[in-house]
Amino acid sequence: MAFDAFQKRKERQLLWLLLPALVPLLILTIYPAVYAVYLSMTNEALTGVAAAKPRFVGVANYLRLFSDGRFWNSLFVTFVFVVGSAIIGQFVLGFISAIALRRKIVGAPVFGAAILLPNAAPEVVAGFMWISMLAGGDHATLSKILVFFGLPYVDWLQTFPLFMVVMVNTWRGIGTAMILLTAGLAAVPAEVYEAARMDGANPRQMFMRITLPLMAPTIFLYMLISTVSTISVFGLVYALTRGGPGNKTEVISVYIYNQSFTAFQIGYGAAGAVVALVVSLALGIAYVRSLKVEV
């Protein structure tokens, strides 16, 4: 009995300790998500009769959403954006950077600082920085370089819009990938590598059979964080292209914004936000269960 009382008192103490974190989570995350689900089942708008007297419409917004080709295009663009920048670009370049920093190379601190520097710039600021380099006309930085070498200038954001957005987001996220993967590499015991060398293993075999298997939890954790955060990227894409040209870079976050605050259809935009939330949750659960990692 005394032990049970002690356990209950300890649980109450832990709950009080968690309360400062639970309250902001409830107010800033759970309540907005629940309210978004409610809005998605109404015809709430910013103008017109629906703005003054919104009414419940059930799943009408979802039926309209799933029959909208522009919505499916935004999901496809988001898929390409996430795979290209988060899974391929940031992971591969971040892993290479992490391995490089583990080795004794000249100027390693400068290299690490240069990789982390993009994180210092907010999304919108980074977007306008890259606009100055990629925009059309002969005043853009890359255009001046091309003209200097006798080549015609290119409007990169019009000719290769999605590739440019993927490249810029990759540039911004390499630092985060490098930090997490460097921590994962540091957790691999050096004795394991020494034993493998003594057994005659070459660097490729050690990487494939030691480094990757032992880093699998770190890699999947990074993939989870990177995938979910990339799905929600808005400021960078909106600053660069606003979803254009021709919706070629309209990721799901920009689609939701356009429907909610450009077309003034709050309820319909909320339906898109709920779908994006469900996709993020499904991906998160899949990542965790695929390796049975406790996150």
Image: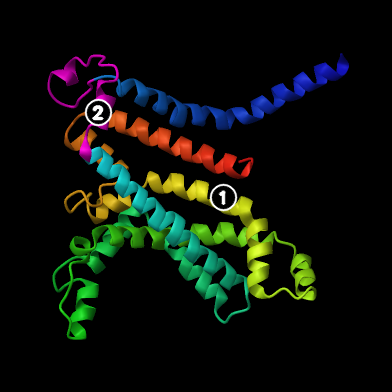
- Mark 2 Cα shell of 10 Å, populated few (<14), some (14-19), many (≥20): many
Q: Which residues are magenta?
A: 43-69
Residue at the limit of the structure toward the right, as seen here: 2
Q: Is the Cβ of the residue at disc 2 closer than 8 Å to that at disc 1?
A: no
Near-viewer residue (70 or 243): 70
Q: Is residue 73 left or right of residue 282?
A: left
Residue sitting at x 34%, y 20%? 38
Mark 2 or mark 1, whichever is nearer to me: 1
Please provide percent x and percent y for residue 28: 44, 31
Mark closest to the chain's N terminus, 2 or 1: 1
Q: Which residue is mark 1?
A: 220
Amino acid type at mark 2: Tyr
The answer to whether residue 256 is magenta is no
Q: Is residue 200 left or right of residue 91?
A: right
The C terminus - image quarter: top right
Q: Can residue 234 be seen?
A: no
Front residue of 134/19: it is 134
Residue at figure coordinates x 25%, y 16% from the top left: 57
Q: CA distance from mark 2 to mark 1?
A: 33 Å
Residue identifier under label 2: 268
Mark 1: secondary structure: helix
Looking at the picture, does residue 69 appear above or below residue 246? Answer: above
The answer to whether 235 is drawn above or below residue 56 in the figure is below
Expressed as whole percent of the image width and height from the top left, the position of residue 97 reads: 53, 68
Q: Residues within 10 Å of mark 1 (few under 14, many from 20)?
A: some
Secondary structure state at the residue bearing disc 2: helix
Q: Name the spot of residue 40 as percent of width and height, x first.
A: 30, 24
Q: Report which quarter residue 90 is drawn in.
A: bottom left
Q: Amino acid at mark 1?
A: Phe
Q: Is residue 60 magenta?
A: yes
